[in-house]
Amino acid sequence: MPKILIVEDDKSIVTNLTEYLCNEGFEIDSVAGQAEAIERISLNKYDLILLDISLRNGNGFAVCSAIKANTDTPVIFLTASDDEYSVVTGLDMGADDYVTKPFRPRELLSRIRNVLRRNGKAGTVIELDNICVDTVKGIVTKNGKEVFLSALEYRLLLVFLSNKGAILSRNRLLEEIWNIAGEFVNDNTLTVYIKRLRDKIEDDPQNPTVIKTVRGLGYKVGE
């Protein structure tokens, strides 16, 4: 599971990005300022760093300089400024890409996956029993054979696999998947999609062992 450090002082952006990227199969860490970022990078190894240019404590250019001087970790700048100077400065310092705020989460996800692929850091296979999900290629296999899922089924599976061992309520699942459907997903629709997903990934969908029902509480995957 690729590990990403978010260096950003806007708490709402950090909260939303963390939740979104965790559900897409990433491990997320975050800090708010320049000094904290440089210290965290010296103590931990990350596969990619999302770096805001404007920080209350310092700036992203100084952090990027420290990253590139000591590691080969790829950097994507997050910036509210799309002026040419900021973009060119960031790229000249070795940044791998930049995304201008406000950004769409799916666009950022695509940029992250592209940078990880280019840098050979896309170790993004999530495994559970006989199920494997390659989150870069978007391929799901069962016993080595590809399983074809709809976009909503795939997102639902990722939510489960990203929360192994946790009981997920139906309300939580509805909140996680309604965006990708492009419309409100109701409780009956969720039941249908869980049944379809079980039909595709369970050995015996009538007695599921992957997506287990926790009566009165919701669903659970893994221990």
Image (cartoon, grey):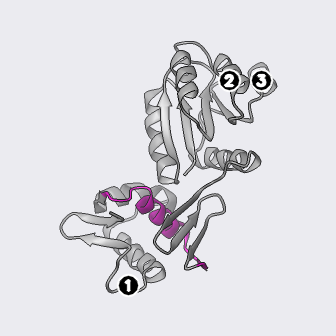
Q: Is residue 14 above or below residue 42?
A: below
Q: Which residue is mark 1?
A: 205
* 1 or 3: tag closer to the N-terminus: 3
**Could you say where residue 223 lies in the image, as x and y percent from the top left?**
32, 63
**Residue range of the region highlighted in magenta in the rendering:** 144-166
Mark 3 in CB contact with mark 2 (< 8 angstroms): yes
Query: Does residue 38 appear in the picture of this structure?
Result: yes
Q: How many marks?
A: 3
Q: Is residue 142 above or below residue 159?
A: below
Give the distance between the C-alpha atoms of the residues marked 2 and 1, in whole angstroms. 49 Å
**Could you say where residue 90 lies in the image, as x and y percent from the top left?**
75, 24
Give the distance between the C-alpha atoms of the residues marked 1 and 3, in whole angstroms. 53 Å
What amino acid is found at the position of numbered circle 1 in the picture? Pro
What amino acid is found at the position of numbered circle 2 in the picture? Cys
Lateral position of residue 46 relative to residue 161, left or right:
right
Q: Which residue is mark 3?
A: 93
Q: Residue at x 49, y 41 (%)?
A: 28
